[in-house]
Image (cartoon, rainbow, N blue to C red):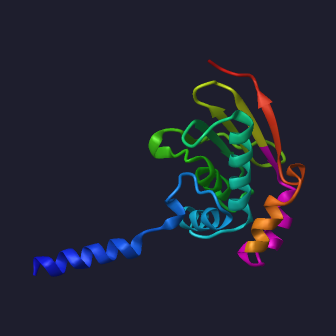
Amino acid sequence: MITALVATLIGTAAHAHDPSFDRIPPQTREELIAAGKRVHGGFGTLVALGIRIGTDAAERLGAGPREVDVTYFDSPAAPCACIVDGITVATAASPGQRTLRIAPEPAGYGLLARVVIRHRRTGRAVEAAVPLEVLPGMSEVNAREEGVRWAYVMHADRDEHFTLTDLPAKP
């Protein structure tokens, strides 16, 4: 009886394994899409945009996984905070580690989202601003398959979807 129970549990755990989390953060397009689906419950353009923002910000800051602190400002116009889930996938920042929070203040006039990403060790920071104007295009592309959603965000010039501005460093 115990042997059967252990075999069942081991079998269940083997099937529950999600290879999208074998590397933190995930590296390949397929791993990132799978992780986005797992974290957010689906993979749309705004999750892809969060991955792009998190990746670009970490690269600019010279930060590795779990080396950033994220403050996300949402907009009432956003369907949900999809972007922050993509940032979680890209940076491994999380509320549970107290390295990611959603601010109670709104993103600001004309913005779908605003994100401050700070390197925890150096204090260097960047701010990403996503204008509301991107929402109709993102929504339209969401009707297409995941690969098109990914390409729409990842292969566009950054300025088409968001700006990334350096902020003063804090000790």
Answer left or right for 111 relative to 43. right
Residue 28 makes an appearance in the image? yes
- Of residues 11 and 49, which is closer to you in this image? 11
Answer left or right for 6 relative to 119. left
Q: Residue at x 80, y 61 (%)?
A: 153
Q: Residue at x 75, y 37 (%)?
A: 60
Residue 76 makes an appearance in the image? no
Image: 13 above or below 120: below
**Start and end of the magenta stretch?**
129-146
Image quadrant containing the C terminus: top right
- Of residues 36 and 60, which is closer to you in this image? 60
Q: Position of residue 53 (x, y in %)?
A: 73, 48
- Of residues 147 and 46, which is closer to you in this image? 147
Q: Position of residue 86 (x, y in %)?
A: 64, 56
- Of residues 15 and 152, which is closer to you in this image? 15
Answer left or right for 167 relative to 136. left
- Indicate yes or no whether the magenta region holds residue 53: no
- Indicate yes or no whether the magenta region holds residue 134: yes
Image: 53 above or below 28: above
Question: Quick one: which residue is furthest to the left in this view?
Answer: 1
Q: Residue at x 68, y 47 (%)?
A: 54
